[in-house]
Image (spheres, grey):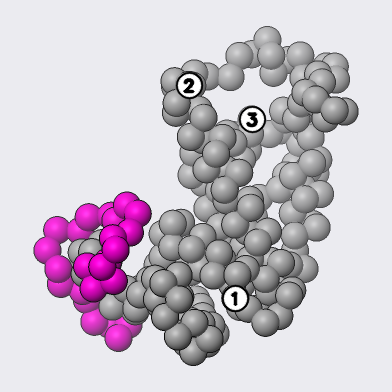
């Protein structure tokens, strides 16, 4: 299945779902056209679980797929389907540690989705950070709300410490490596993490993995 390519014409990302399960699955074929049939199979399992189709049995197939093909799935699924996978682990696994890591990953990803959506809706995507504001947070505490203060651009250890805290959770199979993969992608895609990474100057408090 991994080496079989889905042939369904020009790929088109699905949005939402249709009442008809058959139509939904057909739409998925179109979305994964040109990609490995294994990736389509993974998406189909998630759809079946969400449609409450033989949930226990289908979830076990989903879980086993991640145990056997986790590396391939992490390397080839886009962010949307990686997050769908962590949603599924969070909702259905019998191991509460796996569920917790799944929820941690989904929560982190959804926070990024929300603030990046706000940037788009507010026409802020093309607005650069203001040098005077950067200098301000570097030289004084700038409050946000309820005791939270602005991130100190260039030197702050908040994210370095957070990564240290996440490391044990990233080792929890089969969901932890997905957290690691998503976190890594946040460092290279246009997110607040990559934008602050570009301005970071203190090596001791860097939070990204260069390997």
For this view, does 45 lie left or right of residue 36? Answer: right
Asked whether residue 95 is in view, the answer is yes
Residue 208 numbered mark, or none: none
How far apart in space, not on screen, are marks 3 and 2 (Cα)? 23 Å
Asked whether residue 125 is in view, the answer is no
The residue under label 1 is 92
For this view, does 20 lie left or right of residue 39? Answer: left
In which quadrant of the rendered view does residue 210 lie?
bottom right
Q: In the image, what residue occupies the spot 73% across and 15% down?
A: 135
The residue under label 2 is 122
The residue under label 3 is 199
Q: In the image, what residue occupies the spot 54% across and 70% down?
A: 88
Density class for disc 3 (Cα within 10 Å; few <14, some 14-19, many ≥20) is: few
Tell me the element at label 1: helix
Q: Position of residue 143 (x, y in %)?
A: 82, 21
Query: For the magenta stretch, what is the residue range?
Result: 1-25
Q: Position of residue 203 (x, y in %)?
A: 75, 42
């Amino acid at each position: 299945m991994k080496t079989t390519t889905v042939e369904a014409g020009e790929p088109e990302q699905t949005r939402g779902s249709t009442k008809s399960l058959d139509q939904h699955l057909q739409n998925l074929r179109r979305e994964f056209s040109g990609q490995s049939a294994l990736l389509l199979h993974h998406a189909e399992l998630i759809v079946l679980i969400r449609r409450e189709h033989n949930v226990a049995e289908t979830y076990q197939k989903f879980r086993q797929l991640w145990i056997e093909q986790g590396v391939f799935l992490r390397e080839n699924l886009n962010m949307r389907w990686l997050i769908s996978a962590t949603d599924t682990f969070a909702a259905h696994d019998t191991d509460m540690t796996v569920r917790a890591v799944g929820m941690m990953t989904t929560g982190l990803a959804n926070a990024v989705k929300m603030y990046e959506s706000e940037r788009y809706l507010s026409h802020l995507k093309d607005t650069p950070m203001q040098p005077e504001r950067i200098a301000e947070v570097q030289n004084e505490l700038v409050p946000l709300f309820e005791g939270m203060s602005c991130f100190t651009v260039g030197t702050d250890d908040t994210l370095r410490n957070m990564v240290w805290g996440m490391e044990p959770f990233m080792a929890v199979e089969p969901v932890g490596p997905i957290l690691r993969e998503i976190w890594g992608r946040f460092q290279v895609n246009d997110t607040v993490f990559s934008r602050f990474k570009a301005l970071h100057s203190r090596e001791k408090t860097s939070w990204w993995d260069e390997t």
